[in-house]
Image (spheres, helix red, strand yellow):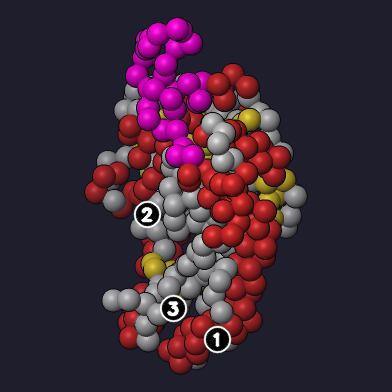
Amino acid sequence: MSFYIPLSYNSINSEALAQVLHKFEGRHHQEIIASLEANLAQQLKVNHVVAVNSGTAAIHLALQAIGVQPHNYVLAPTFTYVATVNPVLYLQARPVLIDCEDKTWNLDPNLLETALRDLKSKGIRPSCLIVVHTYGTPALLDDILTLVSKYEVPVVEDAAEALGATLNKKPVGTYGRVGVYSFNNNKAVTSFGGGAVVTNDGLLASRVRFLAAQARKNAPFYLHEEPGFNYSINPLAAAYLLSQLPDLKNITDARRTVFQNYCNGLKNAGLIFQEEREGAFSARWLSTFLTKSEVVKSRLEESMQKAGIETRPLWNPMHEQPLYRDAISFQNGNARQFFNTGICLPSGNTLSQESQSKVIEVVSRVLM
């Protein structure tokens, strides 16, 4: 079905793209990529950025660069998209899945502590922790970073959904040893396929760049001593992404306005909203809500489909995916409850007031 109100729509700024391409006309394509990386580094206030061809590639490179080995244990949230955890398997490591807390829907620090204690009692020190900023809302990083420092576990921040989000005015994705971003076609700022690894560790950045370019040694001939990957970003994708970065604040503000309009228009509908904690500034990649029950959610989804309005369920927990059912997991029931009752409403920064009013009207008719 062709939805007349899509979940999220990215408008193409052809004029901005043309200006970027004209600027680099006749110059080496690597200059476009270098300019993108410098621009991102400036916006994120980090020392090093390596642009790659997807957020998944960015996670894979980050994990390998910090030294994850086969049979190592990697902590990760269960309430996330599968691309967060799949790179753990690429490296033949073992994911340990942790449920979320019920306010921001991010990784639960209390369960994380339980997991760390349990693993330590078995003589296991995890190679790293992946922290996701779910749907663009910052995780409880203060608690998490304090906790993992006691166990000497490095943090990889999956900020794939959270470009534009901050915690205490510092961009999320820049708190851990390494952070990753995605610029997939469904993201607020897109290259229709792209990602980035960010860090203040120069050696780690060099390792990521080396692995992303087929692990070719610096020699006058082709020399390879270990497997690498074809993960470098396409220069045209880099150019398109570069053309959008000046609009990041406007795009983020527009998505936050969409979310707030839902909160205002549906305040009596019995929905539970994803919270921002003190000091957090969510990018509101998607406007997500919990309904009262699975039955109510199903009724709402059916009504929205009939009205030509695209919605999505929330993430199906990793520990319930066939691929990860045998993984160690620490659960509190939140992720399962969120999947059963949660829904994503149209969230694009180009969503018109007329279209959003239509969405609110249909939701109100079902729930109020």
* Residue drawn 32% across the image and 28% down it: 92
Q: Earlier in the sequence, mark 3 or mark 1?
A: 3
* Residue drawn 34% across the image and 19% down it: 227
Q: Disc 2 and disc 1: Cα gap in Å?
A: 34 Å
Going by the picture, which residue comes out furthest to the front?
A: 26
* Residue drawn 41% across the image and 63% down it: 314
Quadrant in the picture for residue 212: top left
Task: Please tell me whether mark 2 sits on a helix, a strand or a loop.
Answer: loop
The residue beneath circle 1 is 354
Q: Is residue 195 magenta?
A: no
Residue 207 locus on image (x, y percent) = 51, 21
The residue beneath circle 2 is 317
Residue 293 locus on image (x, y percent) = 40, 76
Residue 224 against residue 81 in the figure, above or below: above
Asked if residue 31 lies left or right of residue 88, the reply is right
Amino acid, disc 2: Pro
User: Can residue 319 be seen in the rendering of this structure?
Assistant: yes
Range drawn in magenta: 207-235
* Residue drawn 67% across the image and 63% down it: 250
Task: Please tell me whether mark 1 sits on a helix, a strand or a loop.
Answer: helix
Asked if residue 76 lies left or right of residue 109, the reply is left
Please identify the quadrant where the N terminus is shown.
bottom left
Q: Disc 3 and disc 2: Cα gap in Å?
A: 27 Å
**Callout 2: 10 Å neighbours few (<14), some, many (20+)?**
many
The residue beneath circle 3 is 5
Front position in the image: 161 or 248:
248
Residue 123 against residue 31 in the figure, above or below: above
Residue 284 against residue 257 in the figure, above or below: above
Quadrant in the picture for residue 332: bottom left
Instruction: Report the mark closest to the observer, 3 or 2.
Output: 3
